[in-house]
Image (cartoon, rainbow, N blue to C red):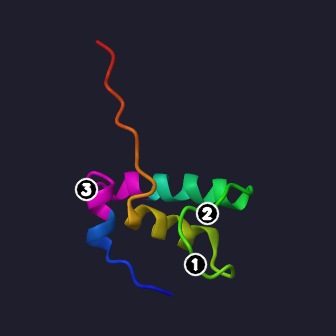
Amino acid sequence: MEYVALEKLLDKSNGSIYKLVILASRRALEIAEGQPKLVEGNPSLKPSTIALQEIAAGKVTAKKIKPKE
């Protein structure tokens, strides 16, 4: 398995570890339910690992929601 540095992942989630965890868990759930994988890899990898690889590759990003005024 390829090591992905935490700093690289935090840059993709606007610097928040909490946003990173939520983004990765939601994407892992989608993968587990049958959504296609956005990165090539070993088919025996867990959905959570694949989700983190997708985030590191920039294939999955969090939406920025503007607050209502």
Hey, what amino acid is under mark 3?
A: Gly
Q: Are marks 2 and 1 in contact (CB under 8 Å)?
A: yes
The image quadrant that residue 7 belongs to is: bottom left
Q: Earlier in the sequence, mark 3 or mark 1?
A: 3
Q: What is the x, y in percent for residue 2? A: 45, 85
Image coords of residue 46 (percent x, y): 64, 75
Q: Are marks 3 and 1 in contact (CB under 8 Å)?
A: no
State the residue in front, 47 or 16.
47
Residue at the image point whose x is 32% and y is 77% from the top: 5
**Secondary structure that dominates the magenta span:** helix
Image coords of residue 25 (percent x, y) = 55, 57
Classify mark 3: residues with Cα within 10 Å, few (<14), some (14-19) or many (20+): few
Q: Earlier in the sequence, mark 2 or mark 3?
A: 3
The Cα–Cα distance between marks 2 and 1, rounded to whole angstroms, is 9 Å
Q: Residue furthest right?
A: 34
Q: Check disc 1 and report the residue beneath it.
A: 41
Residue type for callout 1:
Gly
Residue at numbered disc 2: 37
- The secondary element bearing badge 2 is classed as loop
Residue 38 lies in magenta, yes or no? no
* Camera-nearest label, 3 or 1: 1
Question: Given the image, on which type of amino acid does mark 2 rest?
Answer: Lys
Q: Start and end of the magenta stretch?
A: 10-20
Name the residue carrying label 3.
15
C-alpha separation, residue under disc 2 versus residue under disc 3: 24 Å
- Residue at image coords 47%, 64%: 54
